């Protein structure tokens, strides 16, 4: 089986890339072998994984790798032989790491908060994805319930995921315990949001793979 590769990318810092990458990876690791790759020199995902290992021991269903520059491509190729799903967290600018991570992806997930600044900031990432011919799903993050702005922003976006993450402290709280929210509080609304998004984007990529297999 060929591993599916999801890259979480967005030029804007603080959009929720690392948060989304960690929670999705944990959710998938229940049923699949998963690897997360931190390509951001800032290393937030690495910190979380280190804490996770210290507090909860090693986890053979969720591998980790921190890598940058031109070595990203080789690392993805190596991990593809070991796991079912690879999740790549990327740095907040369109440089070598982001491009290599986007090129290798089956789907690029672009988190954005429902604000005009975040929408404007996605254009550079979308351009990069178009150049590399990789599909994108934009995912709204930190959505406030009943915010009119969210509705008006989402109605104008093409390629928006059906699911989103709300603005919830549980996302950060669980990471601070070295966990995903689906492990920390599996019955919470936050955990349900993670599982729903994980199902949606995995189904999208599985459909893409089976269409490509038919054509081949
Ligand atoms: N859905 C959310 N609800 C509440 N806080 C969030 C959510 N997503 C991200 N955050 C917070 O926003 C900040 C930036 O998130 P982060 O994942 O580090 O973004 P990025 O990796 O894009 O820079 C962090 O403090 C994180 O805890
Ligand atoms: Mg980050």
Image (tube, rainbow, N blue to C red):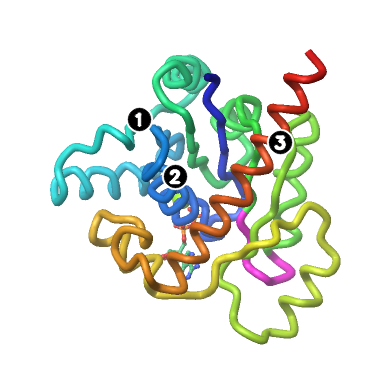
Categorize mark 2 by other alpha carbons within 10 Å: few (<14), some (14-19), many (20+). many
**Quarter of the figure with residue 177:** bottom left
The numbered dot on residue 80 is none
Residue 198, above or below 129: below
Residue where numbered disc 3 is placed: 207
Q: CA distance from mark 2 to mark 1?
A: 17 Å
Say which residue appears at 48% left-offset and 41% top-offset.
Answer: 89
Label 1 residue SS: strand
x and y percentages locating residue 131 in the rendered image = 79, 30
Q: Residue 112: say if magenta.
A: yes
| Number of the front mark, 2 or 1 | 2
Categorize mark 3 by other alpha carbons within 10 Å: few (<14), some (14-19), many (20+). few
Which span is picked out in magenta? 111-117
Marks 2,1: beta carbons within 8 A: no
**Between residues 118 and 206, which one lies in front from this camera angle?**
206
Q: Is residue 203 left or right of residue 179?
A: right
Residue where numbered disc 2 is placed: 28
Label 3 residue SS: helix
Task: Confirm or reject: label 1 Cβ below 8 Å from ligand 2.
Answer: no
Instruction: Give the position of the C terminus as an image quadrant.
Output: top right
Residue where numbered disc 1 is placed: 65
**Between residues 28 and 164, which one lies in front from this camera angle?**
28
Q: CA distance from mark 3 to mark 1?
A: 27 Å
**Between residues 149 and 161, which one lies in front from this camera angle?**
161
């Amino acid at each position: 089986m060929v591993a599916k590769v999801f890259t979480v990318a967005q030029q804007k810092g603080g959009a929720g890339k690392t948060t989304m990458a960690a929670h999705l990876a944990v959710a998938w690791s229940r049923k699949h072998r998963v690897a997360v790759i931190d390509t951001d020199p800032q290393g937030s995902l690495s910190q979380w994984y280190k804490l996770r290992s210290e507090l909860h021991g090693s986890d053979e269903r969720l591998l980790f790798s921190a890598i940058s520059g031109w070595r990203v491509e080789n690392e993805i190729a190596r991990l593809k032989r070991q796991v079912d799903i690879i999740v790549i967290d990327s740095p907040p600018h369109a440089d070598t790491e982001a491009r290599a991570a986007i090129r290798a992806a089956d789907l690029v997930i672009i988190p954005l908060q429902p604000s005009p600044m975040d929408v404007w900031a996605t254009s550079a990432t979308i351009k990069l994805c178009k150049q590399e011919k990789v599909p994108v799903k934009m995912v709204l993050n930190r959505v406030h319930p009943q915010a009119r702005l969210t509705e008006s922003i989402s109605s104008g976006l093409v390629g928006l995921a059906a699911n989103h993450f709300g603005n919830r402290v549980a996302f950060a709280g669980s990471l601070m315990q070295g966990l995903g929210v689906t492990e920390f509080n599996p019955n919470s609304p936050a955990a349900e949001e993670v599982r729903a998004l994980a199902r949606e984007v995995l189904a999208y990529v599985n459909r893409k793979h089976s269409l490509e297999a038919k054509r081949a």
